[in-house]
Amino acid sequence: MAPHSDSRGPGVLAVDEGTTGTRAGVVRQDGSVAHVAYRPIGVDHPDHDSVEQDAAEIWTATLAVCRDALAAAHADGIEVTAVALSTQRATAVLWDGVSGRPLTPAVVWQDRRYAGDLLALEDEWDADLLARTGRPVGSRSPFLWAARQIAENPRVAEAAKDGRLRFGTVDTWLAWNLTGGAVYATTATNACATGGYLLLEHAWHTDWIERLGFPAGLLPELRADDDVLGVTDADVLGAALPVAASLGDQHAALIALGGLDAGDAMCMYGTGTFADAATGTEIFPPVPGADGVLAQVGRREGGTTQFSLEAYCSTTGSALRWLCEDLGFFGSPAEIGELAATAESSKGAWFVPALAGVRTPAWRPRATAALSGLTLATGRAELARAVLEGIAHSVCDLVDGVTATTGSPLRRIRIGGGVAGSDTLMRIQADLIGLPLERVADSATASLRGTAYLAGTRQGLWPSLADIVEAQPAGRVFEPALAPAERAARRDAWRTVLAPHLTGPPPA
């Protein structure tokens, strides 16, 4: 069945709550998004390792954009039939289940305040966690943070003693508020990001969670990503609507970009770049030489889990911003692309964009960035070319890590994100990956659309995910132009340049 093209008719209210802002929009029957509303959200850095947010601000901003989107949809004649959530992952909230107020600032997924304590547990727990949760001990844990809050924060300790304490990631917090406190649950894609979710069992890893000092009795209920979690409180949202899907943001984007079957992948270029690939119902364990490639839930529909792999490099758009705003080398990221397009090569110049460490192919969080190979022949155009090639090589490392883990090539890569708007970067990227890259037409709304597609399919708005995803407009395709031998030579040269940054043991 082809999606209906009328702008009126049924639609899904989709929420995309990210780290720096929250959006809501209405996904219509043709799969497009209308009436997107946005509010920024503050992020605090109390010290070098701590990253926090105001959970009350997250909720009030989300409620405001939901109301704005609903009002615009009503005025446009769209009948909203369901709500779907897409949220930042592993950011945790502790709140009072009676008053509904947060008891402490939320701890953001980037927080590393307990990295040293977690390092001491690696020898004992890494093998078990990698095999069962898809993630190592790592450098952050919302469960350890919550356990320390219970032990050290009097307000949290009192709420725990009185049975009023609630804990959850952002999806749990929003669902609880939207339903007037009726729903205390999380879904598989959000739970797996906490490091305490058993991939095969769809259950909490209570041995590990309790080892961190967190009481298992406080864990929210585990649900499938396409479960109807509950019904919104009409006094809160202005309408009683089923909350029909809840996904982590990158998982939602993977759906919208067509990552439904094994071998389908996406790369989302933003501040950093996420590379995600669907692996079907099979979980792939880590392999040597591909650090940072994590097995996780792609989506859980009913009783069936579709898994995925994810790799991430943290400095893509942030590297461009640093070169332009902090160093003043270029006027804008767009200028970098324009200059790079005029250079046939970098003339031996290299840029390693490891401004916040390296994750893949080796986990070296304290690795540093570098500009090298500069000579009197290096002009601004060659330097710009080196910058884009360094970013493209870093993304290739993610893709290589994913394919090394599965042992199979990818069959399709769709790309999106603000940085992917550079045609020059995308041509370089296609050459180095050696596959056609399709830049999707509306990647900015991918997380909104992906979670809405899952909810709408469950609610009967579309016959299947594949129907609505493949009905979206085709994007621009960038074909590789390099011969395989030249591609291999350039990748080998990059590995030689990168190697000094990967020496030494992985630091805490």
Image (cartoon, rainbow, N blue to C red):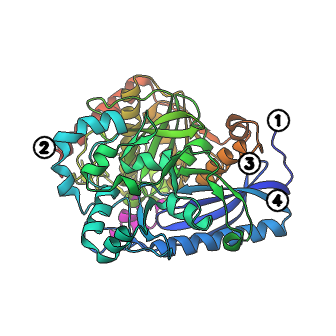
- Label 2, label 3: how many angstroms apart (C-alpha)? 49 Å
Which residue position holds label 1? 1
Q: Is residue 445 in the magenta section? A: no
Q: Disc 4 or 3, which lies upstream in sequence?
A: 3
Label 4 SS: strand
In the image, residue 237 above or below residue 499 = below
Question: Identity of the amino acid at label 2?
Answer: Gly
Tell me what residue is drawn at x 43 percent, y 41 percent: 203
Judge by depth and name the residue closer to the eye, 413 or 70. Answer: 70
Residue 478 placement (x, y as % from top left): 57, 38
- Label 3, label 1: how many angstroms apart (C-alpha)? 13 Å
* Region rendered in magenta: 320-333
Question: Identity of the amino acid at label 1?
Answer: Met
- Label 4, label 1: how many angstroms apart (C-alpha)? 20 Å
Which residue position holds label 2? 504
Judge by depth and name the residue closer to the eye, 458 or 48. Answer: 458
Q: Is residue 247 left or right of residue 104?
A: right
The numbered disc on residue 31 is: 3
Front of the two marks 2 and 3: 3
- Using a 10 Å C-alpha cutoff, classify the residue at mark 2 as few (fewer than 14 neighbours), some (14 to 19) or many (20 or more): few
- Label 4, label 3: how many angstroms apart (C-alpha)? 14 Å
